[in-house]
Image (cartoon, rainbow, N blue to C red):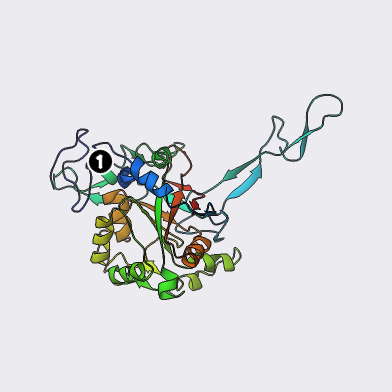
Amino acid sequence: METSSSSQRWRRRPEGSNWGDFGADDQVGRMNLITPERRLAAVQEVKAGLCFPLSLPLDYPGWTSHEGGRNPPVLFASRDAHGGAMYNKVMGLGANPRGVVCDDAVIMHTQYSTQWDSLAHWGGRFDADGDGVEEIVYYNGYRAGDHLVAPDGDSPPRALALGIENLAQVGAQGRASVVSLVDAFGPGRTWVGFDELQHALQAQSVEVRPGDFLLLHTGFDDAVLAMNGKPDRAVLNETAAVLDGRDRKLLQWVADSGVVALCSDNVAVEGFGFEDGSAGDHSMLPLHDLCLFKLGIHLGEMWQLNALAAWLRENDRSACLLTAPPLRLPGSVGSPVTPIATV
């Protein structure tokens, strides 16, 4: 499709994308579908007044390096003006001060554990100018270099557009529909395409509405927690369902469904590492390509969904109110998150 945005970032948009549909300078994608009316409808899902935290402990899964350098958080004490640790430190006035303070800091990879991917997390090579030359672009035509600035010497990286703070500002709250893939297919590795997903949704009477967050419980969270911070990657690679991004019918359903986010308890929502090359030469993660790059559908990964899914199953329900704002951290491409489901 050839068109022209008011800011002239692109003249062509990828086939099947919605660039420009929410405005030339939109940075939150399908989150625009969560209207006040849909949020009010989400509140109607609260009937029991119970809440379920959906985050793993943020030092889980426990691996020391993942996907090229995602390392566990490092917690340390803040220091006072003299270099002393601000931990169990007596403070106050007079000869015998009574106050005691602890103050700490953390170095954390934003996508190590329970997380949101921002729309700046995944882009693509695409001829957005229509001149026969591919550029590196992201959702809605935002550009590498101009908007996604790589580190340079002492200058840190920064997302000048599409950063996670945009999701924080819209609140990330609405109706969530929950489907248990582990109930449908068991705890082993299952590649879930359109047919398998529809089977699970229908068997569990899950109604996915436009504007919904879709939460996928695969059982990966139980497997990770059972390993007590010492994950066995070989075992986890054969554990739990993953969406099959190679299935064009599944991709079309995601596009047509109106969901604003896909959130799973596993590592990437979809499977990856297609040794047969069937994902094509354009993207290792075709669902990421569709969701983050083309449609502005946020992805949540490594959420803890076991207790919520069990309660909903026991109470013949499949939806809840979800509140899941990320850190309002300007310029970051992802964020840890502690989502809350209220039922």
| Count of marks placed on residues | 1
Question: From the viewer's perspective, is 283 left or right of 53?
Answer: left
Residue type at the position of mark 1? Phe
- What residue sits 48% from the left and 42% below the top? 327
Q: Position of residue 271 (x, y in %)?
A: 37, 66
Q: Position of residue 25 (x, y in %)?
A: 27, 36
Front one among 85 and 261: 261
Give the class, few, some or many, for how many residues have Cα within 10 Å of label 1's Cα (few <14, many ≥20): some
Question: From the viewer's perspective, is 186 left or right of 83?
Answer: left
Q: Position of residue 156 (x, y in %)?
A: 45, 38
Q: Is residue 117 above or below residue 272?
A: above
- What residue sits 39% from the left and 51% below the top? 175
* Extreme-right residue of the structure: 95
Picture quadrant where residue 300 is located: bottom left
Q: Is residue 154 above or below residue 320?
A: above
Picture quadrant where residue 90 is located: top right
Q: Position of residue 70 (x, y in %)?
A: 49, 54
Query: Is any part of residue 110 visible from this angle?
Result: yes
- What residue sits 60% from the left and 49% below the top? 74
Query: Is any part of residue 272 visible from this angle?
Result: no
Question: From the viewer's perspective, is 226 left or right of 293?
Answer: right
Q: Name the residue carrying label 1.
A: 22
Question: From the viewer's perspective, is 20 left or right of 305?
Answer: left
Q: Secondary structure at mark 1?
A: loop
